Amino acid sequence: MTAATARLTSPGARPRELLRLAGPLVPILLTGAILFLAPAFLSDFRQNLLAKFLCFAILAIGIDLLWGYAGMLSLGHGVWFGLGGYAMGMYLKMEDADGRLPDFMNWSGLTAIPWFWKPFEHAWFALPAAVLGPGFLAYLVGYLVFRSRVKGAYFSIITQALALILSIFFVGQQQYTGGTNGLTNFSTLFGFTLADRATQDALYYLTVATLLLTMLFATWLTRAPLGRLLIAIRDDEDRVRFSGHNVTLLKAAVFAVSAALAGLAGALYVPQVGIISPANMGIVPSIEFVLLVAVGGRATITGAVIGAILVSWARSTLSENYPDTWLYLFGALFIGSVLLFPAGIVGTWRSLLRHRRLPIRRPPFRAPSAVRLDTPGASHE
């Protein structure tokens, strides 16, 4: 029996101890209750829009693990999101083609399905590839980068360059990737019509369940010894290295986990939105993904989810109501939120709560010795 279990099973277990252990589950349960009930109050369009935001929330949790807890700012996470999305998109196109050549390949002059497209006929290959593929590639890139002791702004520049290179590469491969237009015009998923409300409902609830599982996983990881080690790397990497830990492998591993979550988000995004293109892989979306975490709050799993939903909702609302000036308003919103809440929404809220809970300690009052009447030899005349 562990010490924590003994404290809980003892007759004098305190409610505060129970609250401390169950506290991290409260935001997850509350989030799940709200999201599972949301379709009852939303139209089909708004529900589909919320599902898109939840995909970004899964991606934001991955960035938060990498940036908020491990201290590595990636400006190229659109690459991993796009690779996961393309893996799912290739499967959907092959399912629609049913053994024939996909439509955009016909337009590009191809006469046979490329060899690297054929495995994506099978869901058992495409779905794991959407998650494990980005994770494996990120691990290789991370290992090579971190082995050379690259960190800080130089790591961010490398990831940004990777996003630029791959987005341009995908644009240039028109016959294989659809070029600028990307992959679109999906009709079925596992034999179910994507346009049906029942299919979209199933995809929405699958996205909610995936988000909750991701929150549970991230909460467990950050509270485990490995999570404490990531925070130590963020605060003082050299000390962790001198303590005997392999910092290169640890950083590459968390980079891979973060990329795998981004690929998972991309795979869920494609059948609900209906398109994946190089525009989702470039520098601009990659920076926007980082801003989701910055607004919500670094090193707070709940903050990443809140930031993703609020920022995405603000962008959608501003673009609908102010089509000519929404970009300026959106930029002003980012600047204002960072200036007013540098720790993010959840980080600022936690700081306020800690400030209110701090007791005000006043030193005990003591009369000056010149006027104290109880001192030895004091005159009582």
Image (cartoon, rainbow, N blue to C red):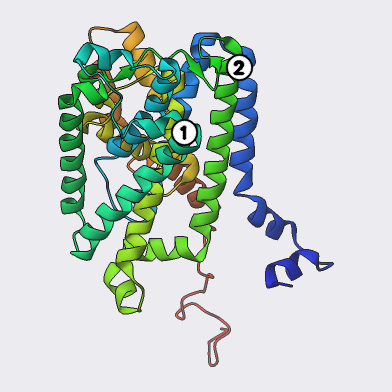
Name the amino acid, label 2.
Answer: Pro
Q: Circle 2 is placed at which residue position?
A: 39
- Residue that carries the numbered disc 1 in the rendered image: 306
248 up-or-down from 48: above or below: below
**Can residue 2 be seen here?**
yes
**Which quadrant: the C terminus?**
bottom right
Q: Secondary structure at mark 1?
A: helix
The image shows residue 110 at horizontal and vertical percentages of 22, 19
Q: Position of residue 375 (x, y in %)?
A: 54, 87
Label 1 neighbour load within 10 Å: few <14, some 14-19, many 20+: many
Q: CA distance from mark 2 to mark 1?
A: 18 Å
Q: Find residue 92 and report its horizontal and vertical position in percent.
A: 43, 22
| Image quarter of residue 106 | top left
Identify the amino acid type marked 1: Ile
Residue in front for this viewpoint, 176 or 144: 176
Q: Earlier in the sequence, mark 2 or mark 1?
A: 2
Q: Residue at x 27, y 72 (%)?
A: 238
Foreground: 15 or 3?
A: 3
At horizontal 28% and vertical 37% (from top left) the residue drawn is 79
Of all residues, the one furthest to the front in this rendering is: 111
Question: Is 69 positioned to the left or the right of 355 in the image?
Answer: left
